[in-house]
Amino acid sequence: MFGQHETAQTSIASGEARTGPSFGGLARVDPFGTREAVLSGPLTNTSQIAFICGRIGESSLEEKEMATLSGTLAPAPSGAHGFDCTAVLTAASAKAMRQKGFDFCVRYLSRLAPQAGGDLSNAEAKAIIGSGLALMAVQHVSRPNWLPNAALGKQFGQGAVANAQAVGLPDGMILWLDLEGIMDGVTETDVIEYCNVWFAEVEAANYQTGVYVGASCILSGDELFFRLTTRHYWRSGSHVPDIPHRGYQMVQFISAKPDVVNGIAIDRDVTMTDALGGNVNWLA
């Protein structure tokens, strides 16, 4: 966007987060992604404006079609044993984990686009699925003692969508919001608005949503169930509230000692059907 007075060129997503107005789906096809500024400091003349030529809508669609992963999106059966990890998996390491008896793995999406090095890529996703492991995806949470709000929910939700599409995750797949480590004193209203705006951004792009309930999530079980718009809950290995009426669809187990398998540090996860008959889904 370009305007008068102390002008800086910035992404649509950043402008929406800072000022409030929405430009609909334009942020998802903005070639500048979610960068705070294209050029640091004010622009002093029009020659500094950055341009990207081409029909953005068409190229974005073509890129999505090229990136989309093969595989089947399906409900995960109850009792499947998997893991989440921050390490990048290769074809060999994914196959070795499958041979250890794991059914699935959960890998990370960055908060902002593009995907950071070390987070899930299209090549890694293909290697995981090709090994026989099913795949799920969760977005990184901010550093401990962070402050959620609606604007941040919008920005991070758009980042999750852009990165999921770049990886090639198909429509209908659950993208998980990691809710933990929130600063003491933050209001429940701010947390709920953050989550529901994030969910709205993700669902507008035809993904499903879920929430990982971690330590210091601020919300009670009733607030998690009645006030959030998602229907999928993943219980962390920390002491967290039960979800009334529904329960959890996946539970994480954190061992007292580091859990390292084939040189990869992991937390273990088990899927289950909740009290209302709901399940997580995965790409396999």
Image (cartoon, grey):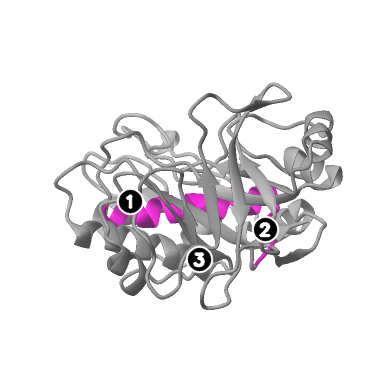
Q: Which residue is mark 3?
A: 232
Residue 79 tag number: 2
Mark 3: amino acid = His
Where is residue 199 shown, x and y percent of the image?
44, 64
Mark 1: amino acid = Leu
Tell me if 44 is positioned left or right of 232 in this view. Answer: left
Q: Which residue is mark 1?
A: 152
Where is residue 63 shown, x and y percent of the image?
72, 53
In front: label 3 or label 2: 2
Tell me if 249 is positioned left or right of 97 in this view. Answer: left
* Residue 30 visible in the current orientation: no
Residue ID at (56%, 33%): 116
User: Are the residues at dot 3 and dot 2 in contact (C-beta closer than 8 Å)?
Assistant: no
Q: Which residues are magenta?
A: 149-171
Measured in 3D between alpha carbons, the distance from the residue under mark 3 to the one under mark 2, in whole angstroms, is 16 Å
Residue ID at (45%, 45%): 34
From the image, give the main secondary structure of the stretch colored magenta: helix
- Decide whether residue 161 is among the magenta residues: yes
Residue 272, above or below 40:
below
* Residue 7 visible in the current orientation: yes
Mark 2: amino acid = Gly
Residue ID at (44%, 35%): 47
**Secondary element type, mark 3:** loop
Q: Between 24 and 92, which is closer to the camera in this rendering? A: 92
Residue ID at (54%, 24%): 258
Residue 17, above or below 122:
below
* Quarter placement of the C terminus: bottom right
